[in-house]
Image (cartoon, rainbow, N blue to C red):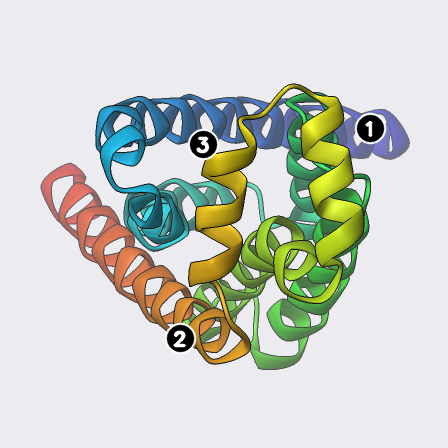
Amino acid sequence: MLNMDNNHKAVQALITIGIFNAVFIAVFFAVGLSLSFMTTLVPAVALIMPVLLALPGGIIYFFMVTKAPANGVFLISGAILGIFMVAAGNMAFFLLCMTGAGMIAELLFRGIGRNSFWGKAAGFASIMAGFVAGGYFPMVFMHKAYLEFQLARGVDSAYLESMLAILSPPALAGILLATAGSAILGSLWGHKLLHKHFAKAG
């Protein structure tokens, strides 16, 4: 009976993780669409996408890990996002980064504390750092392979060259730091919303 109850809780946690990741992906599309017009005029705008995504994403992840603080919540989420981004046309390197980020997030979540704000926020910041690494590391450190991969997909060469010219190691470091900061702010926003929800319910 106890084993069946544990299995039921595990299934519920997986469903919850799946739903919240689906919401995160929907927000990713919304942010991408809102930036699409501007990126055709100013390609560099695309580089701030993870920074913007991390704000609503922090709310989504904070609610998710509060509702389903199961073992592997960040690792599963990282794998889901990695698979989705590769299917959406990114290099397989993206999945590697997201899986690694998920592992680091799990260690932070467990080490700092599952019930701690900073445990949840650090875990999500790690996920978003993996998101930046998967998308932008190849542009900086795998320049030729990235260019060949995107050209084979039919991406405009002028657009690619303009993006590659803008993104340097210092710019990448800046995007990583800004995204991590945005992830913490988003988590703080989620924490406050959750606190208000419980205050009203109680």
Q: Amino acid at mark 1?
A: Asn
- Local crowd at mark 3 within 10 Å, few (<14), some, or many (≥20)? many
Badge 2 is on which residue? 174
x, y (%) of residue 23?
Answer: 43, 24
Q: Determine whether 39 is above or below 198 in the image.
A: above
- Local crowd at mark 2 within 10 Å, few (<14), some, or many (≥20)? few
If the image is split into quadrants, where does the N terminus sit? Answer: top right
- Residue at position x 34%, y 69% from top? 178
Q: Which mark is residue 66?
A: none
- Distance of label 1 from label 3 (alpha carbons): 26 Å
Badge 3 is on which residue? 24
Q: Determine whether 64 is above or below 8 in the image.
A: below
Q: Determine whether 94 is above or below 191 in the image.
A: above
Specify which label sits upstream in the sequence, 2 or 3.
Answer: 3
Q: Secondary structure at mark 1?
A: helix
Are the residues tagged 2 and 3 within 8 Å (C-beta)? no
x, y (%) of residue 114?
Answer: 56, 65
x, y (%) of residue 58?
Answer: 36, 51
Are the residues tagged 1 and 3 within 8 Å (C-beta)? no
User: Could you say which quadrant of the image residue 182 lies in?
Assistant: bottom left
Mark nearest the camera among 2 and 1 is 2
44, 7: nearer the viewer: 44
- Distance of label 2 from label 1 (alpha carbons): 43 Å
103, 69: nearer the viewer: 103
Q: Amino acid at mark 3?
A: Phe
108, 142: nearer the viewer: 142
Specify which label sits upstream in the sequence, 1 or 3.
Answer: 1
Specify which label sits upstream in the sequence, 2 or 1.
Answer: 1
Q: Amino acid at mark 2?
A: Gly
Badge 1 is on which residue? 7
Mark nearest the camera among 1 and 3 is 3
Q: Secondary structure at mark 2?
A: helix
